[in-house]
Amino acid sequence: MGDFIQALVAKYNYWIYITLMMIGLYAMIAKNNLIKKIVGMNIFQTAIILFYVSIGVKKGGTLPIIEHGHGAHSHVVHAVDYINPLPHVLMLTAIVVSVATLGVALALGIRIYNRYHTLEEDEILSQIREK
Amino acid sequence: MIWQLDLAILTLVVIVGIGAITVKDLLGAAIMFGAYSFMMCLLWSIMGAVDVAFTEASVGAGVSTVFFVAAVFRTTRRTKD
Amino acid sequence: MKITGLIIAVLTGALLIYATADFPAWGDPASPASTHVSPRYIEKTIEETAVPNMVTSVLADYRGYDTMFETTVIFSAGVACFLLLRIFRREEPEERLYRHVLTGVTIHVKKGGKLPPSDDFERIDTEWTPHDLIIKTMCRLLIPFIQLFALYVIAHGHHSPGGGFQGGVMLGASVIVLAMSQDLRTAVRRLREKVDALLCATGVFIYAGTGALCLLLGADFLNYRALAPLLNVDPIMARSHGIFIVEIGVGIAVMATMIWIYSNVSSSGKYDEGL
């Protein structure tokens, strides 16, 4: 029991990220509506980005911006004092790319609606089969 | 980092995430997704990832929600699930 | 399908939760991710690039190659949206509707008909909804400040959170606000579609061009030290200025792409009244 409490305190963040990822995955597989699927895709994406950003967290570290940056070379910078900036960089670009892919997904959704006049997957499939 | 705040926002994120995929109105889902993105932004600023939080606040909560609303406006609000 | 989906999601989740047993504890400073590459970035950023915000220096300098292709991905997404949705309607519609701004009278102009030469008419679509005066005025007042703040965010990205991506999105959002509070035609009149598409490509070109310029000056691709003689500063400041040039490119590309995607999605490619 003591071990479990320890693991819970150390890892509860990861477990909630996995829950979010499960919500996204479920929406992508099981939802019938295309916009709902896109929302699920975005939730999945943000859950993974959340996980990546949390890797960079250091207990006792501060923001990855050095104080008194203007020509103050005197004080030595220690890596332990600052949060890891690398996951932030990778995920920052990933967020902007995710909105661009969201635009393409919505464009595809609009095209499908213009052709079949519905966004429901089963209705689209039955219309395709009728032809 | 304050773990009480962290846990509270994580719970809210899960609730809003479930809400976004279960609400039976696509406009509602779009707005719920905006709320979800904003919660995410708060979570990242708690973790100290200020640049990522800033990006998410402008991209996720701002522009994505507008895209969703625009797409719903051009298609339909109706959804079966 | 619902049951299958639930089972798959729960199985994947259970597998991942099982895998967290091997993870380092949350926020552990000694975790592998924090001990290998990143200490060098953290400790050398001031020394090598004179940029206090590590995220900016890693984004545009140490990992500039990565960011360049991310910008290219955004550009291609804009082009994909355009190709998917844009409809070029060559033939005239049956009748066009114009609204007299002062009196609110709508006149129908038949095919081939001409409008009396006056500035008091605005082109409308079939469903005209009145513009809310409060929203219109507020947005008009706010847009310059949004744009000013966006420029600040791009220019001050070296010292505070911000940079090309955030500033570009905000610049794009300011035009989107204009398009939402009035109509898409007003926004397109300010920023033509062709100009927008050209800006989109220009942003990527500035980024790649800076890299190619370094190549021409005899250094590696995107090694901004080579720009020192051109900018008339020492090599460390040249890296700082190189990051700034690249951020401007990113900002332009992201701004133009956001506007492009919005105008295509909100009017489903017809470029009419929009949202």
Image (cartoon, coloured by chain):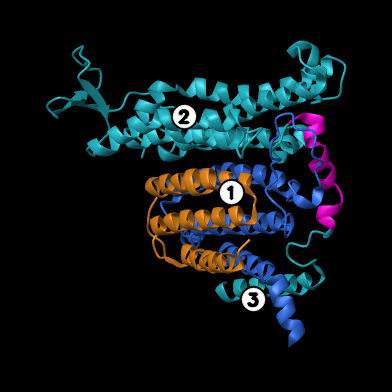
Residue receiving disc 3: C7
Q: Determine the secondary structure under disc 2.
A: helix
The image shows residue A40, relative to residue C112, as above or below, that is below
Q: Which residue is most to the front? A: A74
Considering the whole magenta stretch, tell me its main secondary structure: helix
Chain that the image shows in blue: A
Name the quadrant containing residue C167. top right
Q: Is residue C183 above or below residue C19?
A: above
Q: Which residue is mark 2?
A: C147
Task: Give the extent of the magenta segment.
Answer: C32-50
Mark 2, chain letter?
Answer: C
- The residue beneath circle 1 is B53
Q: CA distance from mark 1 to mark 2?
A: 20 Å
Q: Colour of chain C?
A: cyan
Q: Earlier in the sequence, mark 3 or mark 2?
A: 3
Q: Which chain is orange?
A: B
Q: Is residue A89 left or right of residue A113?
A: right
| Residue at disc 1, secondary structure | helix
- Percent of width and height locating residue C175: 43, 31
In terms of image quadrants, where is residue C116? top left
Q: Amino acid at mark 1?
A: Ala
Residue A5 visible in the picture:
yes
Q: Position of residue A93 (x, y in %)?
A: 66, 42
On-image quarter of the C terminus of chain C: top left
- Residue A77: mark: none
Is residue B41 rendered to the left or right of residue A83?
left
Residue C83 in sight: no
- Amino acid type of disc 3? Ile
